[in-house]
């Protein structure tokens, strides 16, 4: 799958994670939007219309679950795939991610292959 021009949003309060994801995805031709908190992401999603969103679970103020739930409650964005990112590999977290509508759950540190596989699995290109 060609990822050229695909808009990917990465929401994570860790600058390292944002930078890593951005570097890996830009090499694949993606347009990467990085945001450090859920509130800022929610205010940008309608304008930027990302094809897929990666969101960290553990963030201050608005965590990844709430961010995902709010994205999925918006009729314009409910079909936008949301991938949860977490440093914990817990079954509870995965289950909770599914409840709020996340398509998938990646454990950090993720690999370039995992990011690309998640995009290929969930983004439908015409």
Image (tube, rainbow, N blue to C red):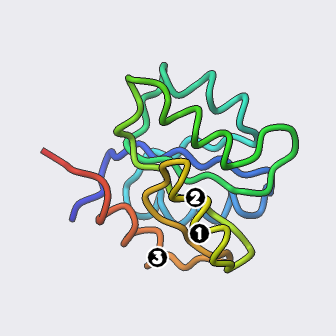
| Residue indicated by mark 1 | 94
65 relative to 16, above or below: above
Residue 37 found in image quarter? top right
Q: Position of residue 91 (x, y in %)?
A: 63, 77
Q: Residues within 10 Å of mark 2 (few under 14, many from 20)?
A: many
Please tell me in which quadrant of the rendered image residue 92 appears.
Answer: bottom right
State the image coordinates of residue 31 (x, y, percent, origin top left): 44, 45
> Which residue position holds label 3?
114
- Residue at the spot of label 2: 97
Q: Secondary structure at mark 1?
A: helix
Give the vertical position of 123 relative to 116 (above or below): above
Q: Quadrant of the C terminus?
A: top left
Q: Comparing marks 2 and 3, which lies closer to the viewer? A: 2
Q: Is residue 79 above or below residue 81?
A: above
User: Residue placed at 62% from the left, 52% from the top?
Assistant: 55
Q: Position of residue 75 (x, y in %)?
A: 39, 23
């Amino acid at each position: 799958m060609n990822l050229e021009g695909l808009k990917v949003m990465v929401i994570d309060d860790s600058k390292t994670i944002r930078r890593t994801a951005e570097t890996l995805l830009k090499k694949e031709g993606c347009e990467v939007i990085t945001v450090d908190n859920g509130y800022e992401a929610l205010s940008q999603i309608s304008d930027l219309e990302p094809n897929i969103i990666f969101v960290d679970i553990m963030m201050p103020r608005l965590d990844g679950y709430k961010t995902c739930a709010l994205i999925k409650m918006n009729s314009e964005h409910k079909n936008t795939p949301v991938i949860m990112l977490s440093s914990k590999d817990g079954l509870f977290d995965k289950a909770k991610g599914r409840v709020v509508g996340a398509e998938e759950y990646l454990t950090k540190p993720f690999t370039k292959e995992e990011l690309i596989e998640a995009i290929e699995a969930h983004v439908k290109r015409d």
